[in-house]
Amino acid sequence: MRVVSGIQTTGNLHLGNYLGAIKNWVAMQDQGECLFFLADLHALTGTVSPQELANSTIEMAATLLAAGIDDRSILFNQARVPAHAELCWILNGTARMGWLSRMTQWKDKAGKNREGASVALFDYPVLQAADVLVYKATHVPVGEDQRQHLELARDIATKFNLDFNVDLFPLPDALISKAAPRIMSLRDGSAKMSKSDPSDLSRVNLSDDDDTIAAKFRKAKSDPDVLPDSFDALEGRPEAKNLVTIFAALSDREPQSVVEEFAGKGFGALKPALADLAISVLGPIRDRLVRMHNDRAHVGAELAKGAAKAQTLAAPTLRAAQEAVGLQV
Ligand code: TYM
């Protein structure tokens, strides 16, 4: 079992990233060989200042270390392992324009301004395919929003193997978090919690202090009704469902057991309990992160160490792909 996953280095890490991905990454460290990376090349698909990109790569790496990614895993930033970009170029020969045009993230992010979008934004999923295929990943733990990109990676792998008559790339399986496949915005139950949402109140950042976490849950959109005694009865109440889902995921409980505890009570009861719970889980991560701020050199050294290991693992696959297509390098 080889586990590979990444996170784009723009903005802040938030509760959606934590519950949808990072929490699983930490748990999987005992189950297989794990590689986790900061997708800094992917950040170039949008407009990001050099200073912001450099800072956010170190800040996010520090957050992953603070959240419990440790020596059992290989942690690095994508730009330091050129095999990702090199394999991406080879796979660009395999991926089809039609496949990429159907990616919902491309459609959402490019919006009506396709002519003005960067080529990198369109090619984004091919780089993501290279990220996992270059390590022959078997499992890719991600949130629901990445499912389509993973399916594309499987299509690219299948076509490459077929076109060049090789058995090079195994098909990676997406491991979607059962507890928190899609955490929604605290301000709008129909939009996913996202680092690009202009409202900071829409998300809990892993760097937020306790008072901010409490205030964000207090101000979270909910509804005036009491909680029912069954989770299924929350259908049609997206904000309520989201808060119960967050409660359950943070406490490793079933959503049904959470609604049973609060049945007949309103959000005046659930929200403070949820804020306390979130602070008890996220507070220690943030405290470790704050301590690491004085030691950015340590974080940089960890990334360099990880990149050297990742490079060694990626090199044979890249070489085999080059040979398969006839490149003499
Ligand atoms: P990114 O940086 O948007 O998100 C990182 C991880 O967090 C998950 N996630 C969520 N899960 C539940 N609820 C949410 N609201 C939520 N928001 C984010 C994402 O699904 C993801 O698992 N393209 C990727 C980064 C990437 C990658 C890869 C991932 C680059 N190469 C290779 C896996 C394998 C991205 O932008 O994720």
Image (tube, rainbow, N blue to C red):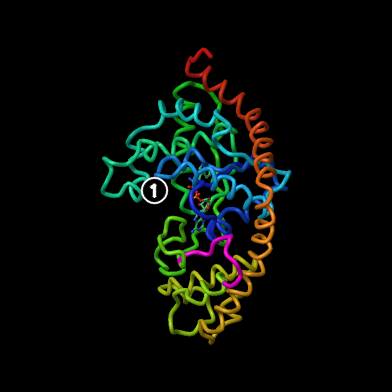
Please tell me which residue is depicted at 68% across the width and 39% down the height of the picture.
301
Residue at image position (68%, 41%) is 302
Rendered residue at 40%/73% (across/down): 236
Is residue 1 among the parts visible in the rendering? no
Indicate the position of residue 68 as horizontal and vertical percent values: 69, 53
Q: Was residue 209 drawn as part of the magenta stretch in this picture?
A: yes
Q: Which SS class for mark 1?
A: helix
Q: Is residue 121 above or below residue 201?
A: above
User: Magenta segment, which residues?
Assistant: 202-211
In percent of width and height, residue 309 lies at 68, 32
Q: Is mark 1 within 8 Å of ligand 1?
A: yes
Which image quadrant: the N terminus? top right
Residue 35 magenta-highlighted = no
Q: Nearer the viewer, residue 287 or 297?
A: 297
Left or right, 145 with reference to 104: right
Q: 136 or 196, which is in the foreground?
A: 196
Q: Name the spot of residue 76 as percent of width and height, x first.
A: 62, 39
Residue type at mark 1?
Answer: Gln
Task: Look at mark 1 in the image and give the residue it sits on.
Answer: 105
